[in-house]
Image (cartoon, rainbow, N blue to C red):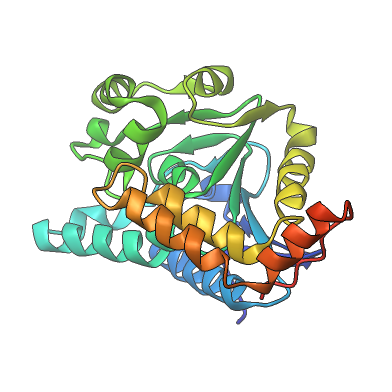
Amino acid sequence: MAYQNILTESKDRIQYITINREAKLNALNKETLEELHAALTAAFVDGQTGGIIITGAGTKAFVAGADISGFPALDAEGGKELARVGQTSVFDLIENGPKPVIAAVNGFALGGGLELAMACHIRVASDNAKMGLPELTLGLIPGYGGTQRLPKLVGKGKAMEMILTSDMLSADQALQHGLVNHVTPQADLLAKAEEILNKILQRAPLAVAAAINAVNAAGSPDGFEKEIAAFGNCFGTQDMKEGVDAFLNKRKPVFTGK
């Protein structure tokens, strides 16, 4: 598929997805979300891809928000459909995907941009990054999962403060509150994301997918049961047998994803 709003590149089992609307500070519009859905879906089923890094073009913005130019034409039902389609096709797709997705936050991550980063499994930010959910300044609330994911990362009190005031956090503040995993200089951002992802790629792929699924279930009524089921299912994989044998024989495991 030929993309107009994103760039994709595969290298050493990593799929790089760059939102390429630099003149618009990489704002998310309908077409960009559709392309993200297509690229993510393809990467998740590609046997040569082990993980994904999402970033934005340029040095100013990861994603500075949703493209709001079409908002005035929407009524209540249109707004609901906009949120539902976006959440299902991109944000939930990332969070529940079977392969690790890292957000390399290279500047502003506001509104839908922060929601995109929060849907990823791990976040690395450049030291110039600023993050926030300013939707209330537009008479809206976050609609791509922000009210659900932010409290899980920073706690309910801080999430309430960020959403209700629309204040932004600096990269260091985001790190302090657990919103991002690491902060690096801009020049080192992708290298740090690659370092983390390459370490994950040394682990058993089926176990990685199972761990993502189990961690996502944390706090749900059946979270412990999902962990038990996933743990048990690992015993039926060749990778588990390979990992245990490698450990017992003091050698490096060779995982095949089977």
Relative horizontal placement of residue 57, taking residue 246 as reference (left or right) = left
| Number of on-image labels | 0
Query: Measured from the top left, where is residue 197 in percent x and y?
Result: 71, 50
Q: Quadrant of the N terminus?
A: bottom right
Query: Measured from the top left, where is residue 40 in percent x and y?
Result: 54, 68
Q: Give the residue furthest to the front.
A: 248
Is residue 147 visible from the viewing direction of this image? Answer: yes
Q: Quadrant of the C terminus?
A: bottom right
Relative horizontal placement of residue 200, taking residue 168 as reference (left or right) = right
Give the residue drawn at x 65%, y 64%: 205
Give the residue drawn at x 82%, y 65%: 254
Figure check: 169 above or below 21: above
Could you say which is closer to the camera, residue 117 or residue 199? 199
Could you say which is closer to the camera, residue 21 or residue 169? 169
Q: Give the residue furthest to the bottom.
A: 1
Relative horizontal placement of residue 174, taking residue 181 as reference (left or right) = left
Query: Measured from the top left, where is residue 52 in percent x and y?
Result: 64, 58
Figure check: 54 above or below 82: above
Give the residue drawn at x 44%, y 60%: 96
Figure check: 107 above or below 207: above
Give the residue drawn at x 34%, y 25%: 155
Is residue 28 visible from the viewing direction of this image? Answer: no
Relative horizontal placement of residue 15, taking residue 227 as reference (left or right) = right
Could you say which is closer to the camera, residue 185 or residue 252? 252
Name which quarter of the figure residue 229 lies in.
bottom left
Figure check: 113 above or below 248: above
Query: Measured from the top left, where is residue 128 in percent x and y?
Result: 63, 25
